[in-house]
Image: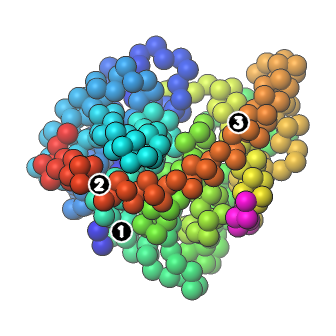
C-alpha cells in the first residue's frame, strides 16, 4: 500500500503568551522529535516521512524549517524524510489562485490548517493512506504493518476509511489546577477516559468510535480526498474530524492494538483556565456545526456519548458558565460563553462552504505539474 507518514512539529515564538497550540515548543528549545524518528527506524519504517513546521506566527516560519532540517539530518540515511513549511504552502496558494480556487485552504498556522496540509501532501504523492503521528510520540515495533492492516478493507460490510488507536500514557494531571467534581466540563478528562474504556472493553475487534487522536490516525484516500479538517476549530480537531466524517458517511474504527507512546511535556501546556475556555469554544462550535449540517441534508452523526456527546447537549451554556466561574467572576464568564455561542452560530455554516471546495482543490493540486513536481522533488531528495 502506498502510504505516507505525516508529523506536524509545533513551534512558538519565545514569550508567546497567546499560543494557538496546547504545548508548542519555543523556537530556541529542543524537540522530542528525535525519539520518534529513532523509533520509526527501529520499527523498520520504509515509507516517506514528512515533518511539517507548524508555527504560531509567520515570524518564525523560516527558522522552524531550518531547525527541523538540522534535527532530521542525522536520520536521512535511514528514512525517506522531508521537511515542509510555509514556503511550500505558498506554492500551493499561488497555484490555487491561478485556477480560481481559494488561497487559504492549507497553512502551517492553526491545528485544522496544518492537518489539511497533511491531507494535501497525501493527495499530491498519490497515497492510498496517510498515517498521522505527532512529534512527542514513539511507536512500537510492527507499528507500520498494523497501521496498514485494516485501512481500505471492509468490516461488517462497511468500508474502513478511518482508523484510530490509543495513546499509552498517564493522563492524570491533564487539567490539574481546577477542582469541581460536579461539573462535567471541569472533569472532561474523566469523560474521555470513560469513552476509551468502553471502546477497550467491548468484544468488537474494530468498534465504531466518536473518539480519536490526531497523533495516531490512519486515513484512506476515499476519506481525505473529500473531507477536510475544520480550519477554525481551536483545539480537538481530531475528534471534530471524526464527527465531520460521520456526517459525510465515513465511520472511524477504534483499533485497541494500534497504539503509540505519548510523551507530552506537561510544563508547556496552556493553563487549565485557558484549556477550559478553548474547550468551551470548540464544543459550542461543534454543536452548532451539527445543527447546520442537518439543515443542509447531511447525515446525523449518531451516538457520540459519552465523549464528545456529553458536551454537545442543551445544558452546555449552564455548565460552561459554572465551570468558568472558578477562573473568573460569573458575569465575565457568562459574557465569554455568550460570545462563543454567538461566534459558533455565525461560523459553523461557513465550514460547509469550505467543504464544498475541498474536492476540487485536492484534485487540482494533485494534477498540477508545478505543485506535484515541487513536492515530489523534495521527497525524492529526502530533504527540505
Q: Which disc, if any, is residue 30?
A: none
Question: Which segment did they paint magenta?
Answer: 296-302
Image position of 308 with respect to 109: above or below? below
Task: Identify the residue shown where x is 57% and y is 27%.
Answer: 270
In magenta stretch: residue 217: no
Q: Main secondary structure of the magenta part?
A: loop
Looking at marks 3 and 2 on the same chain, the residue that comes earlier in the sequence is marked by 3
Q: Secondary structure at mark 3?
A: helix
Residue 65, position as x, y percentages in the image: 27, 31
Residue 191 in sight in this render: no
Label 3 neighbourhood size at 10 Å, few (<14), some (14-19), many (20+)?
Answer: many
Task: Identify the residue shown where x is 34% and y is 39%.
Answer: 94
Query: Which color scheme does this rendered protein use?
Result: rainbow
Residue 99, position as x, y percentages in the image: 38, 48
Taking the view exactly as shown, the residue that stands out farthest to the bottom is 157
> Distance from label 3 to label 2 (Cα)?
37 Å
- The picture quadrant where one finds residue 84 is top left
In magenta stretch: residue 298: yes
> Distance from label 2 to label 1 (Cα)?
19 Å
Looking at marks 3 and 1 on the same chain, the residue that comes earlier in the sequence is marked by 1
Residue 69, position as x, y percentages in the image: 21, 35
Residue of label 2: 368
- The picture quadrant where one finds residue 360 is bottom left
Residue of label 1: 128
Q: Is residue 28 left or right of residue 239?
A: left
Q: Which disc, if any, is residue 281?
A: 3
Taking the view exactly as shown, the residue that stands out farthest to the top is 15
- 28 or 56: nearer the viewer: 56
Task: Identify the residue shown where x is 58% and y is 85%.
Answer: 156
- Location of the C terminus by quadrant is top left
Looking at marks 2 and 1 on the same chain, the residue that comes earlier in the sequence is marked by 1
Amino acid at each position: 500500500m502506498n502510504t505516507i507518514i505525516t508529523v506536524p512539529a509545533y513551534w512558538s515564538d519565545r514569550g508567546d503568551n497567546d499560543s494557538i497550540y496546547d504545548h508548542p515548543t519555543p523556537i530556541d528549545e529542543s524537540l522530542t522529535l528525535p525519539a520518534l524518528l529513532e523509533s520509526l527506524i527501529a520499527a523498520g519504517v520504509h515509507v516517506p516521512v514528512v515533518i511539517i513546521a507548524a508555527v504560531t506566527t509567520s515570524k518564525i516560519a523560516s527558522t522552524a524549517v531550518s531547525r527541523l532540517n538540522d534535527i532530521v539530518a542525522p536520520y536521512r540515511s535511514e528514512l525517506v524524510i522531508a521537511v515542509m513549511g510555509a514556503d511550500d504552502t505558498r506554492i500551493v496558494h499561488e497555484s490555487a489562485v491561478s485556477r480560481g480556487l481559494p488561497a487559504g485552504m492549507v497553512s502551517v498556522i492553526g491545528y485544522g490548517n496544518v492537518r489539511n496540509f497533511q491531507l494535501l501532501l497525501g493527495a499530491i504523492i498519490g497515497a492510498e493512506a496517510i498515517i498521522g503521528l505527532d512529534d512527542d510520540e514513539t511507536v512500537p515495533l510492527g507499528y507500520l504493518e498494523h497501521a496498514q492492516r485494516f485501512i481500505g478493507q471492509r468490516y461488517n460490510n462497511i468500508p474502513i476509511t478511518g482508523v484510530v488507536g490509543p495513546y499509552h500514557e498517564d493522563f492524570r494531571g491533564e487539567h490539574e489546577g481546577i477542582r469541581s467534581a460536579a461539573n462535567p466540563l471541569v472533569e472532561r478528562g474523566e469523560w474521555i477516559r470513560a469513552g476509551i474504556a468502553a471502546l477497550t472493553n467491548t468484544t468488537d475487534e474494530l468498534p465504531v468510535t466518536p473518539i480519536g487522536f490526531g497523533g495516531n490516525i490512519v486515513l484512506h484516500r476515499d476519506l481525505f480526498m473529500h473531507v477536510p479538517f475544520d480550519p477554525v476549530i481551536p483545539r480537538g480537531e481530531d475528534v471534530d474530524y471524526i464527527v465531520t466524517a460521520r456526517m459525510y458517511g465515513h465511520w472511524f474504527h477504534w483499533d485497541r492494538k494500534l497504539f503509540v507512546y505519548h510523551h507530552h511535556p506537561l510544563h508547556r501546556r496552556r493553563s487549565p483556565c485557558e484549556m477550559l475556555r478553548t474547550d468551551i469554544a470548540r464544543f459550542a462550535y461543534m454543536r452548532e456545526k451539527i445543527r447546520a449540517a442537518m439543515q443542509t441534508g447531511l447525515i446525523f452523526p449518531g451516538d457520540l456519548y459519552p465523549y464528545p456527546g456529553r458536551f454537545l447537549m442543551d445544558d452546555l451554556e449552564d455548565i460552561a458558565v459554572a465551570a468558568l466561574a472558578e477562573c473568573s467572576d460569573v458575569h465575565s464568564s457568562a459574557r465569554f460563553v455568550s460570545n462563543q455561542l454567538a461566534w459558533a452560530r455565525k461560523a459553523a455554516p461557513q465550514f460547509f462552504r469550505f467543504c464544498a471546495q475541498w474536492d476540487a482543490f485536492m484534485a487540482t493540486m494533485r494534477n498540477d505539474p508545478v505543485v506535484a513536481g515541487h513536492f515530489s522533488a523534495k521527497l525524492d531528495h529526502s530533504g527540505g
